[in-house]
Amino acid sequence: MAEREFTGRHALMVFVGAFGVIIGVNLWLAYSAVSTFPGLEVANSYVASQEFDNRRAAQEALGWSVDVRHSGGLMIMAISDSQGAPVRVAAMDATIGRATERKDDVTPAFEFDGVAYTAPVELRPGKWDLRLKAKAADGTDFIQRLVFYVNG
């Protein structure tokens, strides 16, 4: 059997093919990143940065801590004050979702049972975020993102 010679044409095809794969994968990754980006967080970052310390100090003065867990199709969120007593908030907006995309986001209808806030929510196994915006009785905003895991 005759040996085939590796020519400049073959080298060019290997070179173009390898870089074609690299460029194609990079374009696909860039498209995936841009198409799943959730969007703008704040309208004006400078103004938000100037107000950040004041909002943080007011929130820390509340002394609240939040514990979240998901068990048997039920989302349980316990908010407690600095003495460990349950807190009933004046208003709440809570969204459960993934950190990287918004397609799985749900906004549960939490009900206060005297100890914690509960809501029926079916979640697939994995890492989830609870994005909580609550308002204290005195009007102080409490904003926190809590990470929790659902076991399969």
Image (cartoon, helix red, strand yellow):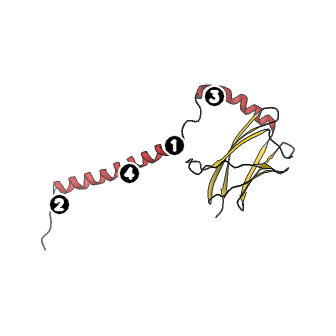
Amino acid tagged 4: Val
Q: Sequence order check: which comes first, mark 4 or mark 2?
A: 2
Mark 1–mark 4 CB contact (< 8 Å) = no
Q: Disc 1 designates what residue?
A: 37
Distance, label 4 to label 2, CA atoms, is: 27 Å
Estimate the x, y position of residue 118 in percent, counting from the top left.
Answer: 76, 52
Q: Residue at x 72, y 49 (%)?
A: 109
Distance, label 1 to label 4, CA atoms, is: 18 Å
Mark 3–mark 1 CB contact (< 8 Å) = no
Looking at the image, residue 97 sits to the left or right of residue 71; the answer is: left
Estimate the x, y position of residue 81 in percent, counting from the top left.
Answer: 83, 43
Q: Sequence order check: which comes first, mark 2 or mark 3?
A: 2
Crowdedness of circle 3 by 10 Å Cα count: few (<14), some, many (20+)?
A: few
Distance, label 3 to label 1, CA atoms, is: 22 Å
Q: Sequence order check: which comes first, mark 3 or mark 1?
A: 1
Q: Residue at x 14, y 62 (%)?
A: 5
Secondary structure type for disc 2: loop
Crowdedness of circle 2 by 10 Å Cα count: few (<14), some, many (20+)?
A: few
Query: Given the current orientation, which residue lies at the most extreme bottom position?
Result: 1
Amino acid tagged 1: Phe
Q: Disc 3 designates what residue?
A: 49
Amino acid tagged 2: Phe
Amino acid tagged 3: Ser
Estimate the x, y position of residue 8 in percent, counting from the top left.
Answer: 16, 54
Q: Residue at x 38, y 51 (%)?
A: 25
Secondary structure type for disc 1: loop
Distance, label 2 to label 3, CA atoms, is: 62 Å
Q: Disc 2 designates what residue?
A: 6
